[in-house]
Amino acid sequence: MFISLRRSTATLAAAGLLVTGLVACGSEDEAVSEPGTSGDKQITVYSGRNEQLIKPLLEKFTAQTGITVNARYANTAQLAAQLVEEGDKSPADVFLAQDAGALGTVSKRDMFVTLPSTTTDKAPATYRARNGHWVGVSARARVLVYNADAVTEAELPASVFELTGPAWKGKVGVAPTNASFQAFVTAITVQHGEARAKEFLAGLKANDPQVRDGNGKILEDVIAGTVPVGLVNHYYLGEVAKEQGTTVDALKAKLHFFPGGDTGGLVNVAGVGVLKRAADNPDAQAFVDYLLGPEAQTYFAEQTFEYPVVEGVTGPAGVPALADLQVPDIDLNDLDALESTVALIKESGLVP
Amino acid sequence: MASTAAVAVAVVPLAYLGVRTAEAGLDRIVAELWTGRVAWLSLRSLGLAAVVTSACVLLGVGSAYLVTRTDLPGRRFFAVLAALPLAVPTYIAAFAWVSAFDGLAGFWPAALVLTLCSYPYVFLPVAAALRGADPAQEEVSRSLGRGGWQTFTRVTLRQIRPATAAGALLVALYVLSDFGAVAILRTDTFTRAIFVAFDLGFDRTGALVLSSVLVLLTLLLLTGETVTRRRGARYARLGGARRAAARLRLGPARWPALAGLLGVAALALGVPAVSLARRLVAGVSRPGALAEVAAAAGNSLVLALAGAALTMLLALPLGLLTARAPGPLTTVLDRLAYLSHALPGVVVGLSLIFFGINVAYPLYQTTWLLALAYATLFLPLAVGSVAGAAAQAPPGLEEVARSLGRGPWGVLRTVTLPLTLPGIGAGAALVFLTGMKELPATLLLRPTGTDTLATELWTNTAVGAYAAATPYAALLVVISALPTWLLVARSGLLDKDDR
């Protein structure tokens, strides 16, 4: 009896704690209520870009403009689903996305305002929406990352299409669920037709690829030497160098930029769009302009190893300049035919 | 009734799936589901669930027997050790295993990691049942001439069957819903396909249509469990003083038994610990200021506590109903509470966004809606604990109280609740634990700007800042260890009243 009494007391004490905790968090909720009304120096940003990368930038923005940013971080695809589910009741003012495809999904639901051309004109036409619904703020190149011990420079393929050949059997890391891989497959369709895309995916699948969940895992395996080469975005190398406390040049893994306008060298963007509820909100507009301003553009180059999209800003260290890349001639606006790409990737058997 | 409220919360995701699937149209549904891929993924998911559940039953019942019914040295220590893996999220465990063993991937490694993380779901209820079971039945069996092994299989295993089945069901449903381990270990399962569908072309409709299959698989499992359940089986102690069963003398067999328990603990706890420590040393990234870490820990605590409180509030009437008024209607209500349990967190999260936006907008993106999501996700954990405790308390006591003139509320307050209190505590601890680890629904529903240990862990590992992620992982496990200890204590495994 003694024991059970003691236990009951413990449970009651826990219940008491609970109530206090709940009351405390109830008042917390009220403190942040109703952000986003026009010009109240508060905006809500849905960020599909990682908190570690973006938070310092948002803090700089707040310091400069006095506008508080309530940021909501999650995976880009899931935030797009969340925005679509929320519809016009969404508390979001701005959607900052990891890639153009997610922005296109929200744009198709007609949830974005048309940005003023004074804003969008800062980025080249290929890196912004034709209808002005979103604008790219940083660019990333598709590359072949390779382990310098496993592959010599002379062995590197001139085209991404060579990777389906016998020389690369079992050696290529791919992340088919990754949005940038999908954009790349769409780019093949745009440049060479759907048949070629289908053939490439079938060839890749037949060549015993090393399928991984994301670009980061491919890179990790390439550095470890368990996978010789992999298709990733260029900036992941910078992330690894940062974590290991070293420079990009000191790593075993090297980047190969496909030459001659090959589809494998597609350049994609991370971008931003303003939701309709913030149509007349100068703070949201100020945020977009800030992202395209020199401070943010330099931040992307130095801290996230991405290419600035605004001319005149120095690019990241350790990689060739964007202007020197032989980028395929593809307009990102043409990459919104995602549905057929998804069907192709599913058919290929590269994903569950 | 009050139980209906609980069930209503549990079926929010089903309603949402219904609405969205209907929108998709018949052609789309057929195109999405009538494929070999869906059949293959279903079989694979069920296969994984079957393998993991069997392994968990073996491991859970085995270790529960060793710590409750034998003279194994250090039993209390091993009881805590066997429950502790509950504090390790599968995504941390899988990540640790991949870090420790290069190239680990596929069905069997995923089965191994899932087993090591979820066998406490079987161990805890079975250990409690073994400890609470009436030894008289075993003694009768022996006195009637049955040997030790026969008594174990014919009597003991039957006594603990409800506990084993309840734990096994939780494991099976958990395996169906798990994304963390199967994603990291690259095993294609249904849940992974659902997540992939969100990523591939941001195809929400396809993902949701696929999710409805998971509900059907759950229905299959639930029906199976219900059909095989022995009707009217009750194993409450009928009067007499509480006394412990005789302990089996292991003799020299104690060494392999000890080695086995230590081995499992080393795999379930040692591998993650060593692996995380190595990551911490290898990287140069560091977590934010102490204040940030503390804030994340505080938020995790508050959210998990709020979730546990709300879940218990909803679970209590349903659990009592299940234990006190069994019948077809009760069974249906109880099973309905389980139906969303195999849905991945992202689907439950989206369904509560739908609910929050269209029904309860003032709650949207507040702690309360997230707490509600936890209730939806974890209701079965709580209902099971309450029902289990209530079933062990003899209904005779309530009848006596009624006959002595107490009204129904008085009986509930003075007899039923105190008797069920240990079950309520256990359920709350279990929900709290699981809530601390939950990630996908938390990401979708947390109040904007609220970081928890789990979200910080995700944020840091997503950019490869593993060293910065490690303290969050460690803190998550350490904080979860406390309710785990409570769970063990409540099972009576720490009591010293036995020989």
Image (cartoon, rainbow, N blue to C red):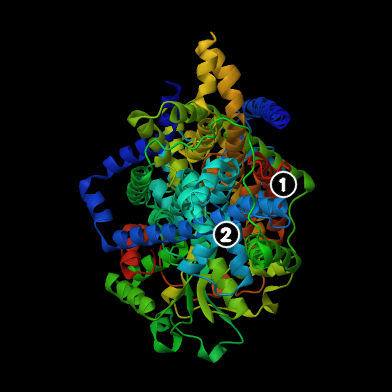
The amino acid type found where label 2 is placed reads Leu
Residues tagged by mark 2 and mark 1 found on one chain of the structure: yes
Among numbered discs 2 and 1, the one appearing first in the sequence = 2
- Identify the disc placed on residue A298: none
**Residue on which disc 1 sits:** B499
The amino acid type found where label 1 is placed reads Arg
Q: Find residue B302 and report its horizontal and vertical position in percent.
A: 66, 35
Q: Find residue A115 and report its horizontal and vertical position in percent.
A: 47, 44
Q: Is residue B126 visible?
A: yes
Q: Residue at x 24, y 50 (%)?
A: B28
Specify the quadrant that holds the N terminus of chain A. Answer: top right
Q: Is residue A51 visible?
A: no
Q: Find residue A134 and report its horizontal and vertical position in percent.
A: 46, 49
Specify the quadrant that holds the C terminus of chain A. Answer: bottom left
The residue closer to the viewer here, B397 or A83, is B397
Dot 2: within a 10 Å radius of its alpha carbon, few (fewer than 14), some, or many (20 or more) residues?
Answer: many
Q: Residue at x 60, y 17 (%)?
A: B414
Q: Secondary structure at mark 2?
A: helix
Q: Find residue B328 and report its horizontal and vertical position in percent.
A: 33, 31
Q: Secondary structure at mark 1?
A: loop
Contact (CB < 8 A) between labels 2 and 1?
Answer: no
Residue B148, relative to residue A167: is it above or below? Answer: above
The numbered mark 2 sits on a residue in which chain? B
Q: Residue at x 42, y 38 (%)?
A: B233
B85 to the left or right of B42 = right
The residue closer to the viewer here, B265 or B174, is B265
- Identify the disc placed on residue B116: 2
The numbered mark 1 sits on a residue in which chain? B
The residue closer to the viewer here, A181 or B401, is B401
Give the number of the mark in front: 2 or 1: 1
Dot 1: within a 10 Å radius of its alpha carbon, few (fewer than 14), some, or many (20 or more) residues?
Answer: few
The residue closer to the viewer here, A301 or B449, is B449
